[in-house]
Amino acid sequence: MRGEVEPEPAIQGRIVPPPLNLAAVEEVLSDEAAELLQQARSDNTHRAYAGDWARFSDWCAVNGASPLPAATTTVLNYIAYLTTLGRAPATVERAVSAILSIHTDTGAERPNTRPIREALRAYRKLRAKAGFRPRRSLPITIEILRAMIEAQPDDTPTGQRNRAILTVGYAAMTRRIELHNLNIGDLTFLREGLEVFIAMSKTDRDARGVSVPLPYGSHPGTCPVRVESAWLEILAEHGITSGPAFRAIDKNGRIAGAIGDDGAPVRRAGRGDGIRMTPEAINLVVKEAARASGLPHADRYSAHGLRAGGATDAADAGASMSGICQHGRWSEKSPVVMQYIRHRDKWKNNPMLRVGL
C-alpha cells in the first residue's frame, strides 16, 4: 500500500500526549497555572490539532510506526498517504503543523522539517499542474452587502439579527470568532457612532482588547449604528440587556436567553451552543444570505468575505494601508491587506486600460 512505512516498534492503541511539557518546568504547577498555559492556543486550534493528531496516531498504529517521537520518514509517508486521499495542501500542512506542535509540547525529538517542507511544496506544484486552484472566499463588497441585507426577512428577530451580523461584520472587518465573542456590554453608542470593543483577536495575543469605531452610514439599511441599535432594542423587548450580542433563534422566533412561556430562559434555540451563536452558525448566516439574494457563485461567500469586503472597499475609497490594518486588527506586516490593495490597483491602474483595445 502506498503510504506504508518500514515497521518501527509497534504502538498499542493511540498515544494521547500531554498538551504541554510540564516536566520541563522546575516548579510544580497548580491546576490554574496549567490551565493558563493551555489557553495559549485558541480553542479552534486545539480542536483542529486534536483531530489531526488522532488521525496521524491511528495511521501510525495501522502501519506499525511510532507517532511520538515520529521519524522523518514516518511523517513523509503520512504526507504521501494524505495526498492519495486528495487532501488540500492547506489541510496537509495543518496536519504537519499539529504533528510538529505535539513534539514541541512534549519535548520529543522533532522530525527534520527540511524534507517535510520540500514535500509539501512539491505537492502544491503537482496540484497546480493538475488544474487545482485555491478556492478563496469572495469579498462581500458594499453592493453585495446591500443585496444580502435586502434578502433578509422583514420584521422578524432572525432578519434583524442577521442584518446586524452582516453590517457590523463588514464595517468592523471582523473575524467570525470576534462576532461570536461579542457581548452587549462591548457595544457603546456615542454621538459619532458605535464603538465596538473587541476583547481579543488573532493579532492581540495578550488579549488587551481594542475599540473599533464605526461611524454612521449614509444608508439606513447598511448603517451599522442604526442596524445594531434596532437589534438591541429587540433583545431588550425580550428582557435581554447583557450577555452575548448574537444569539441563536429557533424556527418559532424564540431568542436564546429570553424568558419562555414556562418562565425559564430559552436555551439551545436553533443554531448555536447554548445561547451564544457559534462561529459556524455565523458563517452559515452569511452563506444563506448569499443564496437568498441570488448572487452568482453564491457558494463562494462566507463570513470571511465580510472582513475582506470591508477592507477591499476601504482600499478602493483611498484608505491607507496602515489605517485598514489598524481598523481590521491586521499586523502591519501582514501581506493580506496588500492583496486587497493590489486587487483594487490591478483594475484601476491596469496597463491595458488606455491602449485602445
Image (cartoon, rainbow, N blue to C red):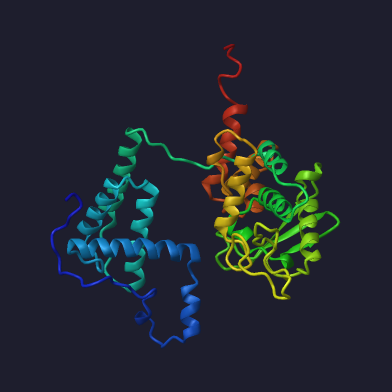
Q: Is residue 60 above or below residue 302?
A: below
| Residue 234 appears in the rendering | yes
Front residue of 222 and 204: 222
Front residue of 159 and 49: 159
Residue 82 placed where, x, y %? 29, 51
Would you identify the image quadrant in which residue 297 lies? top right
Q: Residue at x 28, y 70 (%)?
A: 14
Task: Single out the residue that lies furthest toward the left.
Answer: 7
Q: Residue at x 30, y 38 (%)?
A: 126
Front residue of 31 and 222: 222
Residue 93 placed where, x, y %? 36, 52
Front residue of 228 and 209: 228
Q: Name the image quarter holding the C terminus.
A: top right
Would you identify the image quadrant in which residue 54 lies? bottom left
Task: Single out the residue that lies furthest toward the right.
Answer: 191
Residue 47 placed where, x, y %? 44, 64
Q: Residue at x 59, y 27 (%)?
A: 347
**Is residue 99 left or right of 178 when viewed as pictured?**
left
| Residue 42 appears in the rendering | no
Task: Single out the residue that lies furthest toward the front.
Answer: 262
Count of numbered badges drawn on the protein = 0
Would you identify the image quadrant in which residue 110 lies? bottom left
Residue 312 placed where, x, y %? 63, 40
